[in-house]
Image (tube, rainbow, N blue to C red):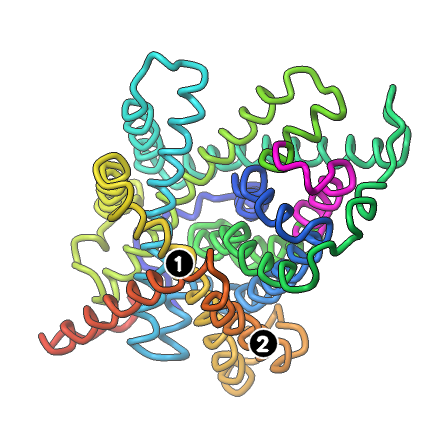
Amino acid sequence: MEEPGGLRRTLQRRHMQMIALGGVIGAGLFVGSGVVVSAAGPAAVISFAITGILVVLVMRMLGEMAVAYPAVGGFYEYSHLALGELAAFLTGWMYWYFWVIVVALEAVAGAKLLGQWWPQAPPWQFTLGLVALFTVVNLLSVRSYGEAEFWFASIKVVAIVLFLCAGAIFVLGFWPGAAGGAQHLTVHGGFMPNGIVPVLTGAVAATGFYFGTEIVTLAAAESAEPERAVAQAMQSVIWRVLTFYVGSMFLVVAILPWNDAARIERPYVSVLEVLRVPSAATVMSVVILTAVLSALNSGLFASSRMLMALARRGDAPRVFGGLDARGVPVAAILAGTAFGYAAVVMSYVSPGKVFAFLVNSYGTVAIFVYVLIAFSQLKLRRRLEREMPERLRMRMWGFPHLTRFAIVAMLAIVAAMAFIPDQRAPLVFGLVSVMVLLAAFALRRAAGFRARPAP
């Protein structure tokens, strides 16, 4: 598969490694994980492990396809190759939708964090400034995006590694001035105090925390060493998931009582307070702000590359497929920025209706994208084995059994959402979003438009 002309292959291996690392450490880990703990108790570790295993499998599938076909649009192109126009149309637009909503959500979250330090400024000014800042970063060059993400990811990685080291020292009983231990794993009703159901529903809730790692496959087409960089990044997914998510959650439930609602609401800050780290809340606020800024930066990058790929295939207006002299898809970036601004306006004007719909739908849409990725790999792998076995330099484990297992498990997560009160609205709104896209595809076909061959 040939690369579209005009792209600059300026992302180095260090950028690709940190794009993948940063993708798996989101603000949801630091803020939202307490919801799972409060429901499942210490067994939240199992919830995150279940979801983590699925993400590892999907990332391995993506790695196999990205090494074979390092294309702009990544899995959107794989859907075209494997499943046809409709699946590709849904994959591309759902993924674009997911990330432009993330841009809006993270801009609002960043404004709230900055408002803690400068309460005299209106929140909308911070929101406007953050989106504008990262629009400029992405408009400069793909290298500027990569550099920004490299440093953001570096801060997040250092923060989580220090957290893991300090927590492990505490649990082992070597932390100065503290007895340590892991008694909170069992003393408050046992390891699984509320039974197996909250553990499984917690796995459903945890799915949204993992999204972002797949961005590295979109960046592959602009990497100086696409095959090598993607292969190395994907091979490190396992230890990253186990260490960053499962490992840190183990320390949280070992150090904090799961039924202390006030502490579990902000789990990582509370752990630092138990360890008597000076200015724990401020330190964690800085780390969370870094995660928010990283998500903003990545959201504009991912949405613009996907929209560019859609445009070059004829699934979006042609204007979004153009590049400037620096190899930057200016129109595609500005489209994501404009949608992000519109969503932010809705967060202030209609928080209970329009913005609530956006928030409730985007996570479910992301699960649908992962399901389509798995179906694409299932079909494309057979074609590669038959026609181009030399391109299979990275292979999905246990094919086809693990691919099928992942598909069934992800569909089970979607089905389970119908029986979990907190997840019903996201499921309904996600299905509505898919139906809107199906209607858009039908109108497009009725108007006589068809996808073009890959550039």
- Say which mark, if any, is on residue 336: none
Q: Is residue 119 left or right of residue 287?
A: left
- Mark 2 → mark 1, Cα distance in angstroms: 25 Å
Please state if 246 lies on the left or on the right of 170 as rendered. Answer: left
Query: Circle 2 sits on which residue?
Result: 403
Left or right of 217 on screen, residue 160: right
Work out whether residue 452 or residue 179 is closer to the camera in this orientation and state it: 179
Residue 222 location in percent, x, y?
43, 50
Residue 248 occupies which quadrant of the picture?
top right
Going from the N terminus, do you reach mark 2 or mark 1 first?
2
**Labels 2 & 1 near each other (Cβ < 8 A):** no
Which amino acid does the dot numbered 1 rest on? Pro
- Hey, what amino acid is under mark 2? Thr
The residue depicted at 56 percent of the width and 69 percent of the height is 61
Q: Residue 258 versus residue 316: which sits nearer the camera?
A: 258
Callout count: 2
In the rendered image, residue 219 lying in the magenta stretch gets the answer no
Q: 230 or 348, which is in the foreground?
A: 348
Work out whether 362 lies above or below 155: below
Q: Under tag 2, what secondary structure? A: helix
Is any part of residue 92 visible from this angle?
Answer: yes
Instruction: Tell me which segment is drawn in magenta.
Output: 241-262
Residue 426: which disc?
1
Which residue is situated farthest in the bottom direction here? 386
The answer to whether residue 159 is left or right of residue 22 is right
Residue 358 in the image: state x and y as whole percent. Answer: 31, 51
Image spot of residue 48 (x, y percent):
64, 55
